[in-house]
Image (cartoon, grey):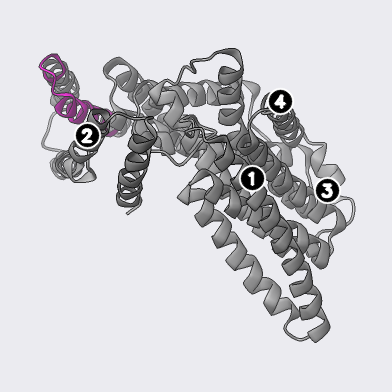
């Protein structure tokens, strides 16, 4: 649905850009022709083929399990090795002929056989069950296939295995330093792959691993320091709010730095798409944390925020978020839209911290509503439907909860609507000024991560 809306908006923008002289008529025609060829319907055969590969791999595993006693041990091992090597040879042959889709499917089949082979080898030699260790081996094998062949499907398998390892290894607080280093190395290898070989699903898998890895770091800090429930809740809210702010700001700061240091920004396709996906995920997380802080701030004990912000995961991520925000404001002295982005992110992160600090429903509601409205306006300003949807969704949830809390008191309702009305009027004034300033500049919108809402592959 979003791709259809994007293509519809693209046609309208191209007409305006051709009239302004920013795009030639022939160039506009080539863009529309490329979009028609790259329509999502062309991906349907590959999607069906991918499901078919998974079904064949499952059928093979079920057949071996059904005839477990009838197949000699040597035949099992030779069969597994033959299937893996043969699938990779088929992938190499298909890649040499330019059939990247077939090569990816063959590599995916080899990766699935490798995963099943790990379990079969464990049963053949009666090895003790070690799900975490098995997940690491699967991740390493899938990563090797993903980087050597450029397989996106193998990368997704590696990301799932890494997530399984992060959630199923040692108990929180008992993790060794070496495990933290291994987790960081796996995260870097998986995050860089979608930059080199862009695909939307692999970007989402990599970002989800980033989120799980940071969550595991928080869990380890809670377990190691025996932190109470209220402090743990404050760590989660503040830590993930800072995490979201970093994901939103890192692409914007990088884009502004390139603009500031060069007249011709270097926009690599995979890097650009990864940063845009990180910004979208960050905006969704920030909106969810704002609503959660509104719902939970009143139940927090005094002093829990101070203990939470002193923990290493929160300190590092919060400091990085503040540093990026300051750098963004310095670099965006000529870009009103960029200042709006960093201002909205700073407002959102500050709202979470102040909501936990004051634990007052009225103050919290005012701050959260201001931040969510700013996110909605930011989505409109940057023409990003994901940001707008996140802002409106958060506003709906917050408004329903606040109305439920104040429905028994007319005075409470009056205060709530008065504060909400003033904030809406103020933000409407700010949005009007920003839109007029952008229209008066008369420049085409840049196509970097800070200017989100463009096409994705």
Q: Distance between the residues labelled 1 and 2?
A: 32 Å
**Does residue 31 lie above or below 414 as drawn?**
above
Q: How far apart are marks 4 and 2 (CA)?
A: 39 Å
Contact, mark 4 vs mark 2 (Cβ under 8 Å): no
**Does residue 27 lie above or below 12 as drawn?**
above
Quick check: 125 left or right of 224? left
Q: Nearer the viewer, mark 4 or mark 2?
A: 2
Please report whichever mark, 1 or 4, sits nearer to the chain's N-terminal start.
4
Q: Which of marks 3 and 1 is in front?
A: 1
Q: Where is residue 367? Give x, y as percent.
A: 76, 57
Residue pointed to by mark 4 = 327
Q: Quadrant of the N terminus?
A: bottom left
Residue pointed to by mark 2 = 29
Within-10-Å neighbours for mark 4: few <14, some 14–19, many 20+ = some
Please report whichever mark, 4 or 2, sits nearer to the chain's N-terminal start.
2
As helix, strand or loop, the secondary structure at mark 4 comes to helix
Residue pointed to by mark 3 = 305
Please report whichever mark, 3 or 1, sits nearer to the chain's N-terminal start.
3
Relative depth, front residue between 217 and 137: 217
6 is within the stretch colored magenta:
no
Kindly identify the residue that appears in the image at 35 percent across and 34 percent down: 156
Relative depth, front residue between 346 and 47: 346
């Amino acid at each position: 649905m979003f791709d259809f809306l994007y293509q519809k908006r693209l046609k309208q923008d191209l007409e305006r850009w051709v009239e302004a002289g920013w795009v030639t008529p022939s160039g506009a025609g080539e863009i529309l022709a490329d979009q028609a060829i790259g329509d999502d319907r062309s991906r349907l055969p590959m999607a069906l083929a991918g499901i078919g590969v998974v079904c064949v791999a499952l059928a093979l595993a079920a057949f071996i399990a059904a005839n477990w006693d009838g197949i000699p041990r040597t035949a099992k091992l030779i069969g597994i090795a033959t299937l893996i090597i043969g699938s990779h040879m088929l992938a190499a042959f298909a890649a040499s002929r330019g059939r990247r889709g077939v090569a990816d499917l063959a590599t995916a089949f080899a990766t699935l056989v490798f995963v099943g082979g790990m379990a079969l080898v464990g049963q053949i030699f009666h090895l003790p069950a070690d799900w975490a260790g098995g997940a690491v081996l699967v991740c390493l094998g899938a990563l090797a296939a993903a980087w050597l062949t450029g397989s996106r499907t193998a990368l997704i398998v590696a990301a799932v295995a890494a997530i399984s390892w992060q959630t199923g290894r040692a108990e929180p607080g008992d993790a060794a330093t070496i495990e933290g280093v291994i987790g960081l190395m796996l995260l870097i290898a998986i995050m860089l792959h979608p930059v080199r070989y862009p695909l939307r699903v692999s970007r989402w898998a990599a970002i989800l691993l980033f989120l799980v890895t940071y969550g595991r770091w928080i869990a380890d800090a809670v377990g190691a320091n025996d932190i109470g429930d209220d402090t743990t809740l404050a760590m989660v809210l503040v830590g993930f709010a800072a995490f979201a702010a970093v994901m939103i700001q890192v692409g914007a700061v990088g884009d502004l730095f390139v603009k500031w240091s060069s007249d011709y920004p270097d926009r690599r396709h995979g890097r650009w798409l990864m940063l845009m996906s990180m910004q979208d995920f960050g905006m969704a997380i920030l909106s969810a944390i704002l609503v959660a802080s509104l719902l939970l701030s009143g139940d927090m004990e005094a002093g829990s925020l101070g203990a939470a912000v002193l923990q290493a995961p929160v300190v590092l991520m919060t400091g990085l978020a503040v540093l990026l925000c300051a750098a963004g404001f310095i670099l965006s002295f000529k870009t009103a839209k960029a200042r709006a982005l960093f201002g909205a992110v700073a407002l959102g992160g500050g709202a979470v911290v102040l909501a936990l600090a004051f634990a007052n429903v009225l103050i919290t509601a005012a701050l959260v509503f201001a931040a969510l409205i700013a996110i909605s306006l930011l989505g409109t300003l940057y023409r990003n439907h994901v940001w707008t949807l996140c802002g409106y969704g958060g506003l709906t949830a917050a408004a329903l909860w606040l109305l439920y809390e104040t429905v028994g008191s007319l005075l409470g309702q009056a205060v709530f609507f008065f504060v909400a009305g003033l904030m809406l009027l103020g933000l409407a004034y700010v949005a009007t000024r920003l839109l007029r300033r952008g229209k008066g500049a008369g420049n085409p919108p840049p196509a970097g991560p800070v200017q989100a809402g463009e096409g994705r592959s």
